[in-house]
Image: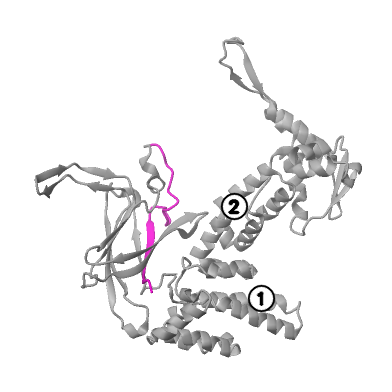
């Protein structure tokens, strides 16, 4: 039994197979003061193996940790060296645990099954992490303040956010890291969810969204979604999950009151004016709308006021309702009337300074009363830098020669073909550039650039430089032998640059 445990700890089925671990790593020390024949011996693997053996063979243990009824013989020295919390608990006289040889630890149902792996890490520095166990491991590392393991878990999460999304653990990652103050990974999870909400909403984990975090996300105009109706349906599924979760916890009356408040809390943030009149009419057939008819009719009437040009009603909502102005501000909608997809295939074969052009149109106004006039746009993308050729500039003294110049930048140039005719007026639009990426085989929106800009007859062109870090999109240009593939290239062969251009009138 002991030998079997030892094999599990060392990852070997035969002790003799570990002989390779006893070989020494030798490096010469170039230090004239100690002589040219001096060497430094690195036998750390063998020493670590000896420490691991103490745990595997349960030798010389002086404390027993009990978790969920399972005993884990351990050593105070190892526990205190690895964890500030264990050091205080086991060495401070004011803690009763410091005088005991048997300590019971209270762990969550998620953490208890992997406590042995956590303890093994303290002895060996080795642990197996995947999207399913990284959260309980991080929870244990946070609880006992094992800083190096915390960093390992956060690094893993940062590199596998897309994997967590498709396996339905990303919302849980977001909420845990937000509560524990891991700001960088929290921001990364927030960005992934708000830029890929439709993907995340299809998972069971979406129903675990805490109300406060969900409401905070719904306030954001940088949320990417096909249209506002699609967002409504995502929230409808979230409400169904809440009803199923609470029905065994509350009485029928309390359940109904709680669900009604949840509907008000989340659906008040749906931007009904951004739905078309046809979509607003379709909502009348929704079971949720029928159940809470009074609330929804009032919200939908705001949308109809916007589409019928009732400016006074719109102003009243903006002035009297908290965040009322947000109801009339478009999000980043990927519906055809607001956006167009641009793909560049065979990216690796493109010559330097290559230009790809896209022409598309978008609505000039989101309100129905303004008609269906469209604005035409010309998009020029320079994914491999911009080359300014030599030219002559005519000035009043004569001509000035301008030398050629190369700009290592990923540039997007947007031209308004028909700006307002009047020189004194301009057209204010919201522009979003959604760039796709690939992580763990999952294609997703990986980066978003958002800007509000005014186009006029004097300013018809907008240039967006550094849309992506040039070196990250073009890693093959660094060295001839570098085979690194950019995370911003998608497709089966990872050779397609894909981006969505979103343009909406900024109301």
Q: Which corner quadrant of the image does residue 259 belong to?
A: bottom right
**Residue 35 appears left or right of 426:** right
- Residue lying at 44% horizontally and 43% vertically, measured from the top left: 484
**Residue 100 appears left or right of 445:** right
| Residue furthest right as drawn | 100
* Residue 450 percent location from the top left of the image: 41, 61
Write down the residue under mark 2: 157
**Crowding at label 2, few (<14), some or many (≥20) Cα neighbours within 10 Å?**
many
Quarter of the C terminus within the rendering:
bottom left
Disc 1 on helix, strand or loop? helix
**Residue 420 appears left or right of 436:** left
* Residue 126 percent location from the top left of the image: 69, 41
Quarter of the N terminus within the rendering:
top right
> Residues in magenta?
481-507
**Crowding at label 1, few (<14), some or many (≥20) Cα neighbours within 10 Å?**
some
Residue 57 shows up from this direction: no
Q: Main secondary structure of the magenta part?
A: loop
Mark 1 / mark 2, whichever is N-terminal: 2
Observer-nearest of 45 and 157: 157
**In the rendered image of this protein, does residue 64 appear above or below residue 381?**
above
Observer-nearest of 453 and 489: 453
**In the rendered image of this protein, does residue 5 appear above or below residue 298?**
above
- Is 494 a magenta residue? yes
- Is 128 a magenta residue? no
Write down the residue under mark 1: 242
**In the rendered image of this protein, does residue 451 appear above or below residue 420?**
above
């Amino acid at each position: 039994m002991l030998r079997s445990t030892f094999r599990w700890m060392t990852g070997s089925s035969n002790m003799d197979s570990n002989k390779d671990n006893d070989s020494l790593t030798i490096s010469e020390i170039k230090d004239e003061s100690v002589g040219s024949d001096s060497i430094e011996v690195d036998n750390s693997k063998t020493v670590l193996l000896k420490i691991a053996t103490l745990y595997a063979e349960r030798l010389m243990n002086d404390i027993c940790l009990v978790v969920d009824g399972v005993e884990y013989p351990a050593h105070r020295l190892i526990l205190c060296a690895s964890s500030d919390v264990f050091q205080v608990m086991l060495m401070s006289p004011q803690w009763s645990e410091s005088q005991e040889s048997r300590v019971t630890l209270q762990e969550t149902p998620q953490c208890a099954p992997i406590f042995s792996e956590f303890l093994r890490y303290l002895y060996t520095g080795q642990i197996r992490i995947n999207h399913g166990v990284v959260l309980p491991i991080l929870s244990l590392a946070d609880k006992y303040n094992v800083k190096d393991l915390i960093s390992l878990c956060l690094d893993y999460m940062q590199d596998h956010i897309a994997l967590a999304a498709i396996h339905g653990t990303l919302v849980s990652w977001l909420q845990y890291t937000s509560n524990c103050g891991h700001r960088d990974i929290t921001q990364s999870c927030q960005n992934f969810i708000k830029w890929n909400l439709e993907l995340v909403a299809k998972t069971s984990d979406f129903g675990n969204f805490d109300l406060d975090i969900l409401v905070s996300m719904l306030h954001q105009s940088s949320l990417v979604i096909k249209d506002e109706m699609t967002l409504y349906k995502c929230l409808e599924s979230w409400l169904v999950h809440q009803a199923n979760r609470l029905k065994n916890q509350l009485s029928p009356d309390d359940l109904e009151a709680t669900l009604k408040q949840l509907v008000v809390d989340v659906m008040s943030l749906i931007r009904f004016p951004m739905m078309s009149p046809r979509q607003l009419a379709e909502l009348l057939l929704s079971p949720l709308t029928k159940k809470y008819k009074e609330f929804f009719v009032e919200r939908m009437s705001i949308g109809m006021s916007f589409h019928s040009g009732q400016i006074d009603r719109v102003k009243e909502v903006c002035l009297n309702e908290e965040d009322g102005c947000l109801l009339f501000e478009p999000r980043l909608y990927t519906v055809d009337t607001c956006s167009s997809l641009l793909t560049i295939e065979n990216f690796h074969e493109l010559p330097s300074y290559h230009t790809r052009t896209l022409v598309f149109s978008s609505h000039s106004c989101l309100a129905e009363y303004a008609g269906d006039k469209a604005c035409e746009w010309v998009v020029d993308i320079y994914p491999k830098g911009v080359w300014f050729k030599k030219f002559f500039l005519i000035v009043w003294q004569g001509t000035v020669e301008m030398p050629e110049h190369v700009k290592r930048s990923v540039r997007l140039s947007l031209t308004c073909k028909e700006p307002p005719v009047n020189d004194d007026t301009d057209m204010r639009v919201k522009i979003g550039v959604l760039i796709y990426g690939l992580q763990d085989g999952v294609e997703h929106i990986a980066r978003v650039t958002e800007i509000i800009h005014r186009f006029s007859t004097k300013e018809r062109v907008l240039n967006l430089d550094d849309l992506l870090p040039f070196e990250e999109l073009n890693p093959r240009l660094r060295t001839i032998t570098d085979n690194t593939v950019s995370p911003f290239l998608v497709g089966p062969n990872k050779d397609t640059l894909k981006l969505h251009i979103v343009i909406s009138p900024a109301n």
